[in-house]
Image (cartoon, coloured by chain):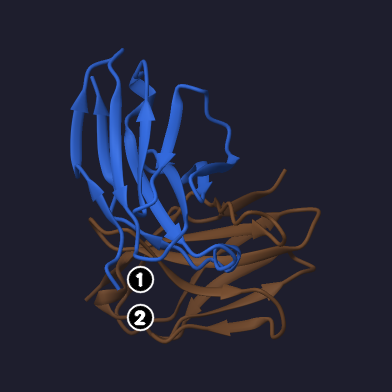
Amino acid sequence: ETGVTQSPTHLIKTRGQQVTLRCSSQSGHNTVSWYQQALGQGPQFIFQYYREEENGRGNFPPRFSGLQFPNYSSELNVNALELDDSALYLCASSLAGRSLMGGYTFGSGTRLTVV
Amino acid sequence: AQSVTQLDSQVPVFEEAPVELRCNYSSSVSVYLFWYVQYPNQGLQLLLKYLSGSTLVESINGFEAEFNKSQTSFHLRKPSVHISDTAEYFCAVTLSGNTGKLIFGQGTTLQVKP
């Protein structure tokens, strides 16, 4: 198993800027989910992609968007950054069907700081 | 709406002592229940899960959790903890039949002291 790799590990951006976070899913996993984990909080579901299409979205504004590519990589894009966007962003991949049973492989996350 | 409440933000305990991390959930429909563990600077790892069947589920490293439908709880227990168990523990639910969206609790920091 190759695991889930996220890049960069740390990132500092200025309010109003745009950011792209990247995730390389575990080989063969066709489902990827993104979570936001604010300091001292549990992860919150942003959205999920299955076969390159959005397949469920949490309570996040449209300035949070994503892409999934055929090579199992994916991106999380955030426009017009706000201070409250500062958090750890986690990527989790799974095989469709196994995600229902908690069969996710999580990456180590990208720590985003907005100043 | 579904929600998960972890009743303790921090649980300090001495090595080899028993521990219980509490989790309650609210949902009007059937759910699947999970415990994830997060070690420093690492991603979340699935510790154990309840999908159906026996209400007592066990992990390979000595943790166990019991699903109690009447009390809507899924508490995590270990009879004797090790220093290496020090980590952040998250309880989570997902709706059966859903896309697999996980709803997490706020997390409990388990601090095992020598």
What is the three-letter code of the residue carrying label 1?
A: Val
Decide: marks 2, 1 in contact (CB < 8 A)?
yes
Which residue, given by chain and number where applicable, does mark 2 sit on?
B81
Q: Chain letter of disc 2?
A: B
What is the crowding at mark 1: few (fewer than 14 residues within 10 Å), some, or many (at least 20)? some
Q: Quarter of the image for the N terminus of chain B: give it.
A: top right
- Please report the residue visible at 18 percent of the width from the left and 39 percent of the height from the top: A10
- In the shown orientation, is residue A60 left or right of residue A113? right
Task: Identify whether A67 is placed above or below B111.
Answer: above
Task: Identify whether A18 is placed above or below B33.
Answer: above
Q: Nearer the viewer, residue B22 or B43?
A: B43
Q: How far across and how far down the image is residue B2, in percent? A: 69, 48
Query: Do the residues at discs 2 and 1 belong to one chain?
Result: yes
What is the three-letter code of the residue carrying label 2?
A: Val
- In the shown orientation, is residue B60 left or right of residue A2? right
**Numbered disc in front, either 2 or 1:** 2
Which image quadrant is residue A55 in?
top right
Chain coloured blue: A
The reply to whether residue A73 is visible in this rendering is: yes
Which image quadrant is residue B107 in?
bottom left
Q: Quarter of the image for the C terminus of chain B: give it.
A: bottom left
The reply to whether residue A42 is visible in this rendering is: no
Which residue, given by chain and number where applicable, does mark 1 sit on?
B13
Q: Chain letter of disc 1?
A: B
- Taking the view exactly as shown, the residue that stands out farthest to the top is A16
Chain coloured brown: B
Q: How far across and how far down the image is residue B39, in percent? A: 29, 63
